[in-house]
Amino acid sequence: MTLSDSAASPRFTEALRELGLEAVGAQVRRFPDATRTAVEAAAAVGCELGEIVKSLIFTADGEPVLVLVDGASRVDVERVRQELGATSVKRAGAELVRETTGYAIGGVPPFGHRTKTRVLADRGLLDHDVVWAAAGTPHTVFPLDPASLVAHAGGTVVDVRERAA
């Protein structure tokens, strides 16, 4: 499969090309059923839940921020707030997610967004050899080593997942 034949969205395919990740385009997997949630994606791929990357948009004092976290974890909004030195952090709504990234919730990849956004990547992603992230649609995912994924996303590695009780 060539990059132009990729199952990924055209915007994401172009981002792969710009980043020199053409080989990743050939690894995009398309599923007949949506993989909007981390649980659905892990089941479709046949991997552990923690190997799925959730790309979540929050607002910090009104500015969009992308947070990357493994599929088995939840984001601790207070830790995000502290990391950013923000007064207020909250989950972005569907309209802001699409406006910021160019993608619908459930298909947001870690890079290739419509606008440049600050990116926080939870350290837990680095615990895996390979992680799977959305490729621009709710039906597509792609594999990449987590260090490369964070680097291509322009992310800062931080601790923002909820601590185990």
Image: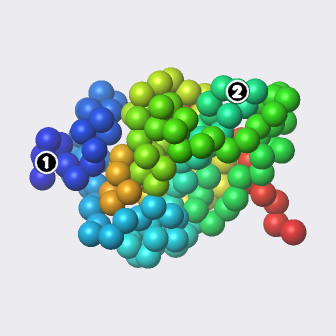
Drawn side of residue 159 relative to residue 1, left or right: right
Residue 130 at least partly seen: no
Q: In this view, does 143 lie above or below 20?
A: below
Which residue matches tag 2? 62
Location of residue 61 by image quarter = top right
Specify the label residue 47 is tagged with. none
Q: Which residue is found at the position 62% from the left and 30% from the top?
A: 64
Q: Nearer the viewer, residue 77 or 18?
A: 77
Badge 2 local density, few (<14 within 10 Å), some, or many (20+)?
A: few
Q: Which of marks 2 and 1 is nearer the N terminus?
A: 1
Q: Position of residue 103 (x, y in %)?
A: 41, 41
Q: What element carries label 1?
A: helix
Q: Is residue 75 above or below residue 95?
A: below
Amino acid on which the number 2 mark rests in the picture = Gly
- Count of number-bearing discs: 2
Q: Position of residue 2 (x, y in %)?
A: 12, 46
Q: Which residue is found at the position 14% from the left and 41% from the top?
A: 4
Residue 55 at least partly seen: yes
Specify the label residue 5 is tagged with. 1
Q: Where is residue 141 in the image (x, y as percent from the top left)?
A: 36, 57
Asked which colour scheme the image uses, the reply is rainbow
Q: Which residue is found at the position 24% from the left and 39% from the top?
A: 10
Q: Label 2 vs label 1: CA separation?
A: 38 Å
Drawn side of residue 70 relative to residue 16, left or right: right
Which part of the image, by quadrant, shows the C terminus? Answer: bottom right
